[in-house]
Image (cartoon, rainbow, N blue to C red):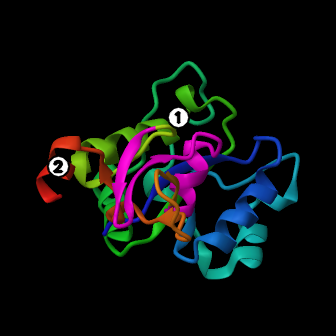
């Protein structure tokens, strides 16, 4: 089973509480700092030394291979420091069932190198990196259901478990991605 892959920006409002909740809920979650220079000029909390002290072995700086070497030039294209080392490192962690939370400070995901990394890993892993959408119908070991639309997708990915609203009551509500599959009514009819 693969772990989850998600991105976080420490400029997002409330991110500290969200991050603490994710780390409590998902004991296999790792904060992967992708900043080329792991420094924050406005808050010591987001500097490499502080993060390493606070999160110990759950914080890993990989900016030397996953950082954008043009981070200080807003008009330059994004260039990942060393994709040939960085991407396999992430994939290996995912294969170990770790959830990688790619950290940067960019407020706009679409213009951040986190998106470049995420898209490249998703392209390499294809269908192996399963992502379910809120409201999507799925099949669980306890019958069909729907991914809870009230819980944001990134939260469910970061926790590496999905909240499912089952069609028939069952006390189990949370499922790992490998316990779910897209709903297929034909397959359900054949197994009945």
Q: Quadrant of residue 152?
A: top right
Q: Residue at x 55, y 69 (%)?
A: 29
In the figure, is residue 12 to the left or right of 179? right
The residue closer to the viewer here, 36 or 31, is: 31
State the SS at label 1: loop
115 vs 22: above or below: above
Which label was assigned to residue 189? Answer: 2
- Check whether the beta carbons of the residues at disc 2 and disc 1 lie within 8 A of each other: no
- Residue that numbered label 1 is attached to: 70
192 vs 186: above or below: below
Which percent across, then down, holds residue 174? Answer: 53, 64
In the figure, is residue 160 to the left or right of 179? right
Q: The C terminus appears in which quarter of the rendering?
A: bottom left
Among all residues in the image, which is located at the extreme left? Answer: 190
Q: Is residue 29 visible?
A: yes
Q: Residue at x 74, y 56 (%)?
A: 18
Which percent across, then down, holds residue 75? Answer: 56, 18
Magenta segment? 136-161
Q: Is residue 69 visible?
A: no
Q: Residue at x 46, y 31 (%)?
A: 78
Q: Residue at x 51, y 48 (%)?
A: 67
Which label was assigned to residue 55? Answer: none
Q: Nearer the viewer, mark 2 or mark 1?
A: 2
Q: The N terminus appears in which quarter of the rendering?
A: bottom left
The residue closer to the viewer here, 191 or 97, is: 191
Among the two numbered marks 2 and 1 on one chain, the one whose residue lies closer to the N terminus: 1
């Amino acid at each position: 089973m693969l772990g989850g892959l998600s991105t976080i920006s420490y400029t997002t409002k409330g991110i500290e509480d969200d991050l603490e909740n994710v780390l409590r809920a998902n004991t296999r979650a790792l904060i992967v700092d992708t900043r080329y220079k792991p420094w924050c000029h406005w808050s010591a909390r987001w500097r490499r030394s502080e993060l390493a002290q606070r999160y110990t072995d759950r914080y890993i700086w990989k900016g030397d291979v996953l950082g954008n070497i043009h981070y200080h030039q807003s008009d330059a294209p994004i260039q990942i420091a060393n994709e040939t080392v960085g991407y396999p490192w992430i994939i290996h962690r995912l294969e170990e069932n770790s959830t990688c939370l790619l950290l940067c400070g960019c407020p706009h995901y679409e213009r951040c190198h986190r998106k470049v990394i995420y898209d490249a890993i998703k392209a390499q892993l294809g269908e192996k990196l399963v992502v379910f959408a809120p409201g999507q119908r799925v099949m669980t070991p306890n019958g069909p259901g729907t991914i809870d639309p009230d819980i944001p997708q990134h939260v469910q990915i970061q926790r590496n478990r999905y909240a499912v609203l089952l069609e028939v009551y069952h006390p189990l509500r949370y499922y790992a991605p490998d316990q779910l599959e897209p709903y297929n009514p034909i397959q359900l009819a054949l197994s009945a």
